[in-house]
Amino acid sequence: MGGDSKSGPAGAAQSAVPDHEAAFRQMLCDLEPYLTEPIAVVGHRVVHGGERLVEPTLVTAEVEQAIEELSALAPLHNPPNLAGIRAARVTFPGVPQVAIFDTAFHRSLPPAARSYAIDADLAARYGIRRFGFHGISFEYVSAAAARALGRPLKELKLIVLHLGNGASACAVRGGESVETSMGLTPLEGLMMGTRGGDIDPGILIYLQRSAGLGPDELDELLNHRSGLLGLAGHNDIRDVQGAADGGDEAARLAIEVYCRRIRAYIGNYFAQLGGADAVVFTGGVGEHSARVRELSFEGLDALGMTISTERNLEATGQEADITGSDSKVRVLVVPTDEELEIARQSLELVERTG
C-alpha cells in the first residue's frame, strides 16, 4: 500500500468501495486475468515502526499490536495502515504479509541527530526521540539519483526533498540518512498541506492556557488546520498557486513561507553534510511544481547552487536534470516509486526467509 506522494485526479470518486476488504476483493478481481502465478507476498507501507520495527518485517499478531500501539505517534497513518494489513490477510489467506516502515531508513541517524534537548530520563521513559518518515521514498529516490548521476551511492552526499501533502527533507550520506526534518511524529519540519511543520512549542502552551484548547483540539489544529490550509485556505499547492496568481495575498504568503522553509533546510543540510553532490526533488509537489523548485532556490547561488529556468519549466513528473550552467551542485527531479520499493523489499524478505 503506497504513500501520499501521488494523488489521483481532482474530484475522483473515493466512495466506490466501502472499506479495505472490498477494495482488496475488487483489486484481486481486476488482477485475476493477468496473474500467471500465485501472489507471493503482500507488502504494506506502515508509517511508524518505533524503536523495534526498523527493517522489513513479516506481520504477526505481535507486530500488529506494536503498529497499533504506535498509532498515538502517527494518528493519520498507522490506523489505516493496520486496517489494510488486516483486510489483506482476509483476502489473501496464507500469503505472507510484510510491513515496510517509513521510519526504518532513518535508523542510521546518529545520536546527535535523533536526540531532543529535554530531560533525558523523561525522554527515555516515554521513548521521545526523532524518528523521521518518508524513508521508503528516500531510499528509492537516493538509489535512483545515484543511477542518474552515474556514480555509486556510497560515494554521494545528497539532499532529498520529498514534497507532497506531507513533506520532509533528508540528508543522505553514502546511502544512509544522517539528518531528516520530521521527528517523533510527522508534524515536525517543512510546511505541508495541513500540517505547519516547525513551530515554537510555547505556542501550544499559550493556546492551552489562553484559548482553553485541550489535547484533542491542539491535535486537530496541528494535523488538520495548519500548513497551506491554515494560511491560504487550500491544502493543494495548485490551488494556492492559482489563488496567488489571482492576487490573493494570503496565498502568496503561504507559498513564500513554504519555499522559505525548504530553502532553510537545504542550507542546513548542505552545512551538515559538508557540501552536497546533488539536491533531489521528489513527491507530488517536488516532481510537478516548477514554481516551488524555483522559489526554493532563491539565494542559494551563494552556496554554488543554481537551477536552469528553461529545464526547470520543462521538468514535470519525469526524471530531469535541472542544474544551472554555473551550478557546482547537481539539481535533479526524480519521481518516487514507493510501491515498487515496497514490493522489492517485501519480495527480498520472503525469498531470504524461505
Image (cartoon, helix red, strand yellow):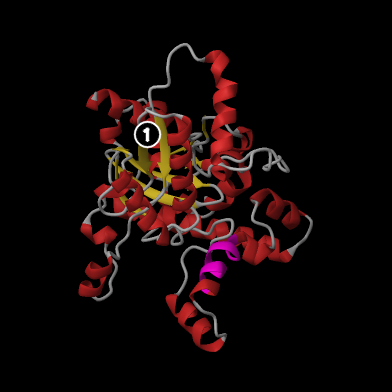
**Vertically, is 193 above or below 318?**
below
What residue sits 37% from the left and 28% below the top? Answer: 94
On the rendered image, what quadrant is the C terminus found in? top left
Residue 278 screen position, x and y as percent: 40, 40
Residue 192 screen position, x and y as percent: 55, 56
| Residue type, numbered disc 1 | Gln
Location of residue 46 (image quadrant): top left
Q: Which residue is mark 1?
A: 97
Is residue 225 located in the magenta-colored stretch of the structure? yes
**141 or 292, nearer to the observer:** 141
The prevailing secondary structure element of the residues shown in magenta is helix
Residue 277 visible to an observer of this rendering: no
Q: Crowding near pointer 1: few (<14 within 10 Å), some, many (20+)?
A: many
Farthest right residue in view? 246
Q: Is residue 107 left or right of residue 341?
A: left
Residue 77 screen position, x and y as percent: 47, 52
Q: Is residue 189 left or right of residue 251?
A: left
* Residue stretch in magenta: 218-227
